[in-house]
Image (spheres, rainbow, N blue to C red):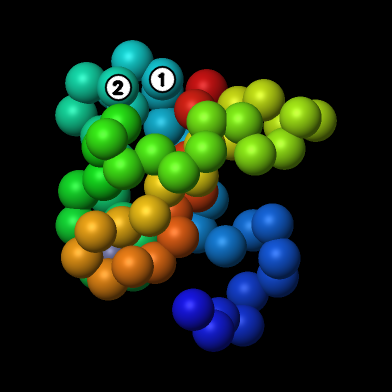
Amino acid sequence: MSRRARPGSVGRQNVPRDQWLEIGAECPHCGERVTEEMVYSWRPVPDDPKLLLLWCPDCGDRVEINHV
Ligand SMILES: [Zn+2]
């Protein structure tokens, strides 16, 4: 969980919403597929309604998706 990236920019991916709901996204850390079932928070930041937070089941890393 220690990364040197700036807060708020850690591995965020832009994924079309339809694509994300259908096939999920890829963990930027280990490449495991993360899906809707692993969503931790659908809207963690009120000012940023497109942001999704998930936890990767494989490496435990946080995955941020910006569904567009
Ligand atoms: Zn992972």
Q: Nearer the viewer, residue 44 or 8?
A: 44
What amino acid does circle 2 point to?
A: Leu
Percent position of residue 68, x then y = 52, 23
Q: Secondary structure at mark 2?
A: helix
Percent position of residue 62, x then y = 45, 60
Q: Nearer the viewer, residue 42 or 31?
A: 42
Q: From the viewer's perspective, is residue 37 above or below residue 57?
A: above
Residue at 45% across, 43% down: 40
The span from disc 2 to disc 1 (Cα, nearest Å) is: 6 Å
Residue that carries the numbered disc 1 in the rendered image? 17
| Residue 58 in view | yes
Question: Cβ–Cβ below 8 Å for labels 2 and 1?
Answer: yes
| Residue 31 in view | no
Percent position of residue 9, x then y = 64, 58
Quarter occupied by residue 30: bottom left
Residue at 72% across, 37% down: 45
Q: Assess disc 2: are there few (<14), some (14-19) or many (≥20) residues with their C-alpha within 10 Å of its C-alpha.
A: some
Q: From the viewer's perspective, is residue 14 above or below residue 31?
A: above
Q: Which mark is residue 21?
A: 2
Q: Nearer the viewer, residue 61 or 25?
A: 61
Percent position of residue 23, x then y = 19, 29
What amino acid does circle 1 point to?
A: Arg
Q: From the viewer's perspective, is residue 53 above or below residue 58?
A: above
Is 42 placed left or right of 4 in the picture?
Answer: left
